[in-house]
Image: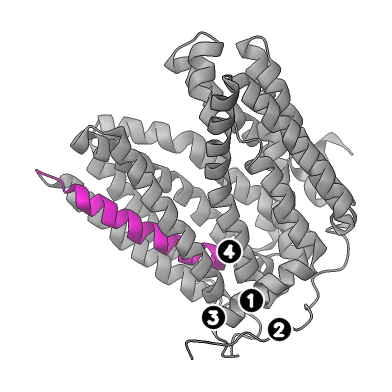
Amino acid sequence: MRLGEMVVDVAPLRSSRDFRLVFATQAISMVGTQLTSVAASLQIYELTGSTVQVGLMSLVLGMSLLVGLLAGGLLADRADRRRVVLVTRAVTAVVVTGLAVNAALPDPHVWFVFVAAVLAGGSAGLGGPAMMAATPSLVPKSQLAAAGALTTLTAQLGGMAGPSLAGLIAAGPGLAWCFAIDAAVYVVGLALLAPLPAMPPEGSGEAQHPLKAMAEGLHFLRGNQVVAGLLLIDVCAMVFAMPYALFPELGTEHFGGGPSTVGLLYTAPAVGSFCGALTSGWTGRIHHTGRALIGAVAVWGLAITCFGLSPNLWLALAFLALAGLGDTASEILRRALLQHYTPDRLQGRVGSLWLAQATAGPSVGNLEAGLVARALGSSAGAAVVGGVVCLAGVATVALAVPGLRKASLQGPAATEPAPSPEVSPAAD
């Protein structure tokens, strides 16, 4: 493969005006979301002086996001996806505007920040599956990996630039401006997305009880080796080898540094992820996509293992960057394969399960890492154990799910699943 083919593929931006509008919206939204996230945490801490309250707000936001994602999957397969995205983003814009007004008051209300977290998380969750499900209708099947890479790139840029920008704005004009800028970003995003065509899902005219609709999505997962394998292999990485909870102790005790060292540990995977997104051109061209995915997750597990064994900080940072690179390649390939092998009328439900797992998985993984570190009495040992278990899990999934090994973006697209068993609609 030539060097030029390694660079991120921008073909979806050239070929689709609608995808350009979505990409521009996501690029500015990622920065705006970081502004609000950081500002809300800072405001809670300023008002309460409690890190527990900050953590509680994050938990409330995460739980409402998770519930919204599960409901949003059903909604994305029953209603016009363009309308769902526009309405949920408009609601979020109103909520963030309320945060700006609250922050500008002489005595801001803590309770309002928590209420806003519930509303914003739920709204973002409801709209997330619809946005994800819309992508296959905006670009050709051959460009799904490239579109996923570009989406990942916007997330990485927002993750790197947003927090620093939030800190500068909070220290200067103030927290209210962070919220106000994010609200303005949502309004701009609405203007960009408004020209998109209607995107009703296939079969959206069929009335179906929510329980039966969810059961149909789960039935599809059980019957499709590729999609089920994608979710299983992600568990191996996110639950068994998530190292972020270990960074504070490793940075201060194991590597003998301070807050700046801990900051470097958190930054290194993001740098690797950004580099992975920039060099993702190969993801849409490789024929054995499933094998490449298995290899990318194995790179994550191996890098985390080597990180735990690293004798010095700089070697540890290098392995964390490698882990970030493998994680980004894995995310791009998983997203593309999921969209390629899922029928349009199920894109919302299947996508919501993937997004829900991506939301909850890291939290569970960090908790598991902390418990293992306590049991072993060593954060470095916990990282090594997590990496080894991840590698064992990847090998098990690769052997047990041959459909995943054979999966390819160059192969046949999604087919309709067999009819699912009837589910009694108790609420009818």
Residue count near mark 4 (Cα–Cα under 10 Å), binned few <14, some 14–19, many ≥20: many
Disc number lying in front (1 or 4): 1
Q: Residue at x 49, y 91 (%)?
A: 428
Report the amino acid beneath label 1. Ala
Q: Pick whichever of labels 3 and 1 is earlier in the sequence.
A: 3
Q: Position of residue 49 (x, y in %)?
A: 22, 32
Confirm whether residue 188 shows in the render.
no
Q: Which residue is mark 3?
A: 210
Q: Pick whichever of labels 1 and 2 is earlier in the sequence.
A: 1
Q: Pick whichever of labels 4 and 2 is earlier in the sequence.
A: 4
Report the amino acid beneath label 3. Pro
Report the amino acid beneath label 4. Ser
Q: Which mark is residue 215?
A: 1
Q: Pick whichever of labels 1 and 4 is earlier in the sequence.
A: 1
What is the span of residues highlighted in magenta in the rendered image? 106-131
Q: CA distance from mark 3 to mark 2?
A: 14 Å
Q: Which residue is mark 4?
A: 352
Q: CA distance from mark 1 to mark 2?
A: 8 Å
Under circle 1, the secondary element is helix
As drawn, 346 above or below 247 = below
As drawn, 328 above or below 383 = below
Q: CA distance from mark 1 to mark 4?
A: 14 Å
Under circle 3, the secondary element is helix
Q: Are marks 3 and 1 in contact (CB under 8 Å)?
A: no
Q: CA distance from mark 4 to mark 2?
A: 21 Å
Q: Is residue 321 left or right of residue 34?
A: right
Report the amino acid beneath label 2. Pro
Q: Which residue is mark 2?
A: 421
Residue count near mark 2 (Cα–Cα under 10 Å), binned few <14, some 14–19, many ≥20: few
Q: Are marks 1 and 2 in contact (CB under 8 Å)?
A: yes
